[in-house]
Image (tube, coloured by chain):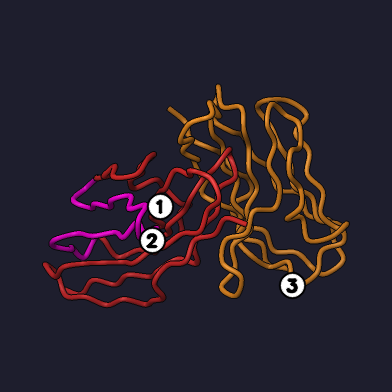
Amino acid sequence: DAGVIQSPRHEVTEMGQEVTLRCKPISGHNSLFWYRQTMMRGLELLIYFNNNVPIDDSGMPEDRFSAKMPNASFSTLKIQPSEPRDSAVYFCASSFTSGGADEQFFGPGTRLTVL
Amino acid sequence: GDSVTQMEGPVTLSEEAFLTINCTYTATGYPSLFWYVQYPGEGLQLLLKATKADDKGSNKGFEATYRKETTSFHLEKGSVQVSDSAVYFCALSDNNDMRFGAGTRLTVKP
């Protein structure tokens, strides 16, 4: 039974380059979340989707960040252009939202380093 | 808005010691409360949860009770093991809006 799948696991890039992070949620889940984790700021929610529709993107830092969910089994988080301060671990999580205590299942994360 | 405040770490204990990690919350509604654990190099995984006041969540020897009168959800374990070394996050969720605490790093020494 596969969990949330993220790729790549590690990404090293140079400032100014475009970075695309990918996520495959658990089959049957209807909500998907993108988080960023740093030592300084902890775990921050960037955006979440429900039924492939972005519901809350207030956590997206700036216009350089964009996220899409073209179908129920795939989402991307893109940073263009990337900057050193974007270096962090990015997590994708999914859940089945039923209005109750909805556990989120996290992927293993993508460690991004921008030089 | 809703928020979670948890005990700052790091916490270092000897094996078989008693563990408490404090967590308090602020919420306008009636949230569900969670403890997540993150092992090195991995994503967060659910440890336990409670959905209403006076509920007790438990798993792997860990327990936490939803206390509405003190707005708390403290994590406890009677006897920790080296394998419990990880970062622990308290969280609340109301209407699919999950808020995490800053995390508390626990190190258990043999």
Quarter containing the N terminus of chain A: top left
> Which amino acid does the dot numbered 2 rest on?
Tyr
Indicate which label's residue lies in the foreground, 3 or 1: 1
Of the residues tagged 3 and 2, which is closer to the observer? 2
Q: Secondary structure at mark 1?
A: strand
Disc 2: which chain? Answer: B
The chain that hosts pointer 3 is A
The residue singled out by tag 2 in the image is B88
Measure how far apart labels 2 and 1 are at the Cα level.
6 Å
- Residue closest to the far front: B69
Q: Position of residue B34 (x, y in %)?
A: 40, 48
Residue most toward the top? A28
Marks 1 and 2: in contact by CB < 8 Å? yes
Q: Which segment did they paint magenta?
A: B59-83
Q: Colour of chain A?
A: orange
In the figure, the red chain has which letter? B
Q: Which chain contains the residue that carries disc 1?
A: B
**Which amino acid type is marked by label 1?**
Tyr
Say which residue appears at 31% left-offset and 60% top-offset. B74
In the image, taking residue B7 as reference, residue B98 lies left or right, namely right
